[in-house]
Image: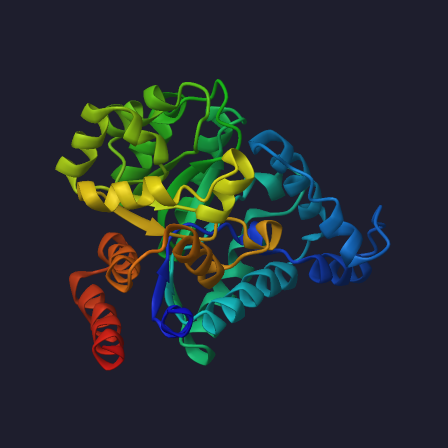
């Protein structure tokens, strides 16, 4: 099973590029950009990863981003992730990035997106990793700021496939950003929003995602299982959920393996993802391996979770079939 999971062609739909910033890279960028860190070694950075809920994680997460200053920094950030993705046999990924976390520090929007876009092109050419980029708004910032950043992004629309919503969910419902997401939809962008596990008003937030925002998919979404009518609506729409097992363990002390299996049983298109792998110390293959071990998942269940990711990806039908063909051929050879 371990060898099968490692070799399986995969898709990842929920990974934050800023969350792939490894401690060693933090130090390298800090030295290059003349930034003094409060840690002496990369291991001290890892030791400081003492978070147990979303707010405590975000405090550390945003502080580390300060080392990202130039287009080359963002190129390296993204390309290093794509190298990890290639090692995990990820053939397609839709990564997130958070421009507000950088423009608020004085970094130009163009600096961020151009660096990432160059890395995407290089990764496709040299690593065989295809990608499409999702711009995420920070929900603990204002809707006006989100709209301003959507306006910044529109000249670069050809570099984006969709928009998302992340960061601290407390008292920041999806409806706060209804106008921003409606405008993004008008410009042909796909829509997704975070509904992280066990957050305040989580069920209301999920209903708003469905009925007010009309999202194309939901990130996390485990709490849909708490309400039968919510679960049934997600199944009826054929909506995908991008679940992050190891990330969940930091928030609710569980990989939520029972919940993910229940999603499969109900026909929900659950997928497995790594979220912020440099912080949770687990990239996509690690998430699959740990989930399989905890839940004693069968080969068929593992394949279905991966197949779901290709199925709900924002790809053309032709590209979906092409990539699913890689998976089918791999499974056939392994059977």
Question: Whole-percent x and y of residue 245?
Answer: 44, 47
Q: Residue at position x 54%, y 62% from top? A: 78
Q: Nearer the viewer, residue 217 or 54?
A: 54
Where is residue 223 drawn, in percent x and y? 35, 30
Q: Where, quadrant-wise, is the C terminus in this rendering?
A: bottom left
Placement of 113 over or under 9, stated as above or below: above
Residue 193 placement, left or right of 274? left
Residue 268 visible in the displayed image: yes
Query: Considering only vertical position in the picture, is 18 above or below 251?
Result: below
Q: Which residue occupies 35% across, 35% down?
A: 222
Q: Is residue 329 above or below residue 11?
A: below
| Nearer-the-camera pick, 85 or 150 | 85
Q: Give the quarter of the image for residue 41.
A: bottom right
**Figure colour scheme:** rainbow
Q: Quadrant of residue 288?
A: bottom left
On the image, which quarter does residue 221 sit in? top left
Percent x, y for residue 207? 28, 24
Judge from the rendering whether residue 34 lies leftward or rightward of residue 226; answer left or right: right
Please give the name of the residue rendered at 32% of the width and 27% of the height, measured from the top-left corner.
206
Horizontal relation, residue 3 to residue 62: left or right = left
Q: How many discs mark residues in the rendered view?
A: 0
Q: Nearer the viewer, residue 334 or 139?
A: 334
């Amino acid at each position: 099973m371990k060898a099968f999971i490692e070799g399986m062609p995969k898709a990842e739909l929920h990974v934050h590029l800023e969350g792939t910033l490894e401690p060693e890279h933090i130090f390298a960028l800090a030295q290059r950009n003349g930034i003094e860190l409060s840690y002496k070694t990369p291991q001290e950075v890892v030791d400081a990863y003492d978070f147990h809920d979303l707010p405590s994680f975000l405090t550390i997460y945003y502080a580390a981003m300060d080392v990202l200053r130039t287009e080359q920094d963002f190129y390296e950030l993204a390309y290093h992730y794509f190298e990890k993705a290639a090692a995990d046999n990820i053939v397609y990924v839709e990564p997130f990035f958070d421009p507000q976390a950088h423009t608020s520090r004085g970094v130009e929007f163009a600096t961020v997106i151009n660096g990432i876009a160059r890395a995407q092109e290089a990764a496709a050419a040299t690593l065989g990793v295809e990608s499409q980029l999702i711009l995420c708004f920070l929900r603990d910032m204002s809707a006006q700021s989100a709209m301003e950043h959507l306006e910044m992004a529109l000249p670069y629309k050809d570099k984006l496939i969709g928009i998302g919503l992340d960061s601290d969910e407390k008292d920041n419902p999806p409806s706060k950003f209804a106008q921003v997401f409606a405008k993004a939809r008008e410009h042909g962008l796909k829509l997704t929003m975070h509904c992280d596990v066990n957050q305040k008003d989580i069920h209301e937030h999920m209903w708003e995602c469905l009925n007010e925002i009309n999202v194309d998919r939901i990130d996390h979404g485990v709490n849909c299982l708490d309400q039968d009518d919510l679960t049934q609506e997600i199944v009826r729409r054929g909506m995908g959920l991008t679940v992050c097992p190891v990330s969940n363990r930091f928030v609710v002390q569980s990989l939520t393996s029972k919940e993910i299996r229940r999603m499969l049983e109900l026909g929900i298109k659950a997928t497995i993802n790594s979220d912020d792998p440099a912080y949770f110390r687990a990239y996509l293959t690690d998430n699959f391996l740990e989930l399989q071990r905890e839940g004693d998942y069968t080969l068929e269940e593992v394949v279905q979770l991966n197949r779901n990711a290709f199925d709900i990806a924002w790809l053309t039908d032709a590209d979906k079939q092409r990539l699913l063909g890689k998976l089918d051929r791999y499974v056939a050879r392994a059977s």
